[in-house]
Image (cartoon, helix red, strand yellow):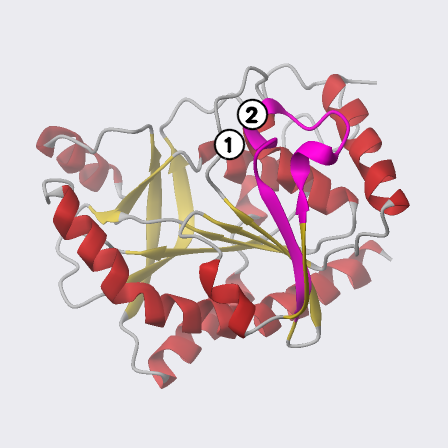
């Protein structure tokens, strides 16, 4: 088997032997998992490094499991270390999918490329991978997905639309648009920002390309929820303060997203059957 398949199989066997619950929804939260304890039940924490063949990028990460709105969750803070393999960065997506996850929520701080004053959050309706993602390089022999995956199903329209309505009902300024996945850790130059805007992107976020490629490859649809933390020329202090200001609304939207994604997961399971 391909090294990715072998890794997922070994880790899956370990999960089953440890009686770790299988997920319906994967939360991959670049904004942190601190607010989950208030809305989740049956919380448990595991170190991914205890799983055989866990890639180096995730060995220090903790996997949170629990239930919210009746749905079984896995949650990870998306802050991996450096990784040598092409597929290691997005490894949890393949693992969650192999365990039965039917939907995914990704959060990450984003910078608008144009005038989005008065808007606090972007829900990605499409994306452009500009960060040189190699998540699918060299995995042609993997049985975990097709050689040329359909990226048109990554962003679940039904969940996104329902979450937009939930945001509106709560008075949270939210819009939809195209996301440009950019490299980091430096922010964009003014020229790059203009380029992404002319290319059709409403916002940029760093390092999400591998995750979206893995979602497409594994057949895991979901929602990208992106707090707009400031423009690319803002100071670090401004970006941090903006993130803190948006944290309560972000926590509410994550909580509102869970039952919506549970419906998506159920629909995916019914289609597979």
Asked whether residue 208 appears in the rendered view, the answer is yes
Q: Which mark is residue 257?
A: none
Q: Quadrant of residue 37?
A: bottom right
Going by the picture, which residue comes out furthest to the bottom? 169
Identified at 42% across, 54% down, the residue is 125
Q: Tell me residue 180's x, y (percent).
A: 33, 39
Relative placement, left or right, of 26 versus 127 is right
Asked whether residue 145 appears in the rendered view, the answer is no
Residue, disc 2: 135
Relative placement, left or right, of 11 versus 57 is right
Identified at 43% across, 38% down, the residue is 208
Residue 14 on the magenta segment: no
| Label 2 CA crowd tier, 10 Å (few <14, some 14–19, many 20+) | many
| Label 1 CA crowd tier, 10 Å (few <14, some 14–19, many 20+) | many
Q: Nearer the viewer, residue 250 or 77?
A: 77
Identified at 77% across, 18% down, the residue is 2
Give the extent of the magenta segment. 46-67
Q: Tell me residue 16's x, y (percent).
A: 87, 46
Q: Which mark is residue 210?
A: 1
């Amino acid at each position: 088997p391909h090294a990715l398949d072998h890794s997922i199989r070994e880790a899956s066997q370990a999960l089953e032997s440890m009686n770790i619950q299988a997920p319906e929804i994967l939360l991959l939260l670049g904004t942190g998992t601190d607010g989950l304890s208030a809305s989740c039940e049956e919380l448990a924490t595991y170190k991914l490094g205890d799983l055989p063949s866990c890639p180096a990028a995730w060995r220090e990460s903790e996997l949170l499991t629990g239930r919210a709105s009746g749905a079984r969750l896995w949650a990870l803070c998306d802050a991996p270390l450096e990784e040598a393999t092409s597929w290691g960065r997005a490894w949890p997506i393949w693992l969650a999918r192999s365990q039965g996850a039917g939907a995914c929520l990704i959060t990450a701080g984003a910078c608008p490329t144009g005038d989005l004053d008065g808007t606090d959050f972007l829900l990605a309706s499409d994306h452009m991978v500009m960060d040189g993602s190699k998540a699918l390089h060299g995995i042609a022999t993997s049985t975990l997905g097709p050689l040329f995956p359909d990226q048109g199903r990554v962003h679940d329209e039904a969940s996104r639309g329902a979450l937009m309505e939930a945001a509106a009902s709560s008075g949270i300024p939210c819009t939809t648009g195209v996301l440009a996945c950019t490299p980091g850790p430096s922010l964009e130059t003014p020229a790059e920002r203009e380029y992404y805007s002319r290319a059709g992107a409403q916002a940029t976020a760093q390092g999400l390309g591998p995750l979206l490629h893995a979602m497409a490859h594994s057949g895991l649809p979901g929602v990208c929820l992106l707090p707009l933390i400031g423009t690319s020329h803002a100071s670090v202090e401004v970006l941090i303060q903006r993130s803190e200001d948006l944290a309560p609304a972000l926590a509410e939207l994550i909580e509102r997203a869970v039952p919506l994604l549970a419906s998506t997961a159920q629909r995916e399971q019914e289609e597979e059957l």
